[in-house]
Image: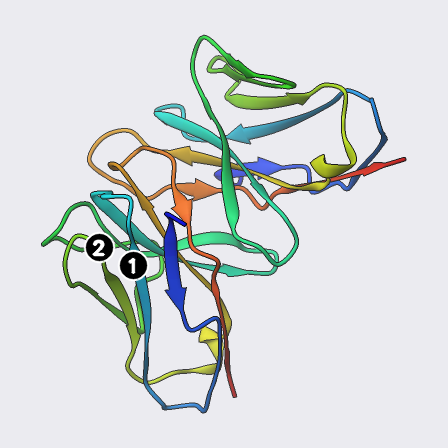
């Protein structure tokens, strides 16, 4: 089925470990995003990529890096995980900025 | 005042009821508005864009009131399957692109 695919779905990390969250979309969308969702905080934008070859910081970029590998793929890397990064991470895509998103099913990350 | 505010609810309504949610925003220059639906432990899904002229999709109607700085979502003839959390999203105008999500309004439709 067409859409946004995220891997892994669940992950437990120890403080200081690194990992990369993968995201791919097959809708030929130009823009891709990484969000985190925490209880009582709503969804917050970490990084986004308006088009292939560009990336920009969102509201909460500290502790994260991203790579727009090609038009389909946008990865999120945690270089040194901290307990404050325990969250649900959603990747999303849209045809262009300021248009509605299609979200992936999320990654539940716990940092202990 | 928070940038985007929603009544968290829950709104508990019987099947067939009409229910309305509001979402207020503080930035008068905001440009784009959306409603999303999120089921428990699932991803948000786009429900509707909100246009200045208002828009309707079946049982759902979205309105924008720029003067009072709020958007609304009206659900008619509620179904059990409408039970979810409804998120509003406000995008700024100009060069900055950082949308603000509301924290959501919980709707429970009971038999």
What sort of colour scheme is used for the picture? Answer: rainbow
Q: Position of residue B49 (x, y in %)?
A: 44, 25
Q: Quadrant of residue A73?
A: bottom left
Q: Please give the residue where the numbered disc 1 appears in the rendered image.
A: A24
At a point 46% along the width and 15% down the height, the residue shown is B66
Q: Residue B54 or B14: which is nearer the viewer?
A: B14
- Marks 1 and 2, how far apart at CA: 5 Å
Classify 10 Å Cα crowding around label 1: few (below 14), some (14-19), many (20 and above).
many
Q: Please give the residue where the numbered disc 2 appears in the rendered image.
A: A72
Q: Position of residue A34 (x, y in %)?
A: 34, 57
Residue A91: which numbered mark, if any? none
Q: Residue furthest left?
A: A53
Q: Quadrant of residue B70?
A: top right
Query: Helix, strand, or loop for circle 1?
Result: strand
Answer with left or right where residue B4 lies relative to residue B60. Answer: left
Q: Compared to A66, does B50 lie above or below?
A: above
Q: Compared to B5, does A103 lie above or below?
A: below
Query: Helix, strand, or loop for circle 2?
Result: loop
> Badge 2 sits on which subunit?
A
Q: Residue furthest top?
A: B53
Q: Residue A76 or B6: which is nearer the viewer?
A: A76
Q: Position of residue B46 (x, y in %)?
A: 48, 36
The reply to whether the C-beta atoms of the residues labelled 1 and 2 are less than 8 Å apart is yes
Choose the circle earlier in sequence order: 1 or 2: 1
At a point 66% along the width and 20% down the height, the residue shown is B74
Does label 2 lie on the same chain as label 1? Answer: yes
């Amino acid at each position: 089925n067409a859409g946004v695919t995220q891997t892994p779905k669940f992950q437990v990390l120890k403080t200081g470990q690194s990992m990369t969250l993968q995201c791919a979309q097959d809708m030929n969308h130009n823009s891709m995003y990484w969000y985190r969702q925490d209880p009582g905080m709503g969804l917050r934008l970490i990084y986004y990529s308006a088009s292939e070859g560009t990336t920009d910081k969102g509201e909460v970029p500290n502790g994260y890096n991203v790579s727009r590998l090609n038009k389909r793929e946008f990865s999120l890397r945690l270089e040194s995980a901290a307990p404050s990064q325990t969250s649900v991470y959603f990747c999303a895509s849209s045809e262009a900025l300021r248009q509605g998103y299609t979200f992936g099913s999320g990654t539940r990350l716990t940092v202990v | 005042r928070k940038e985007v505010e929603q009544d968290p609810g829950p709104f508990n309504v019987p099947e067939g009821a009409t229910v309305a949610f509001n979402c207020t925003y503080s930035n008068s220059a905001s440009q784009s508005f959306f409603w999303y639906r999120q089921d428990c432990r699932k991803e948000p899904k786009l429900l509707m864009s909100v246009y200045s002229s208002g828009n309707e999709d079946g049982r759902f109607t979205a309105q924008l009131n720029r003067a009072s700085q709020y958007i609304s979502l009206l659900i008619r003839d509620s179904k059990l399957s409408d039970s979810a959390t409804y998120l509003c999203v406000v995008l700024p105008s100009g060069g900055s692109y950082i949308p603000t999500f509301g924290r959501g309004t919980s709707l429970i439709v009971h038999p």
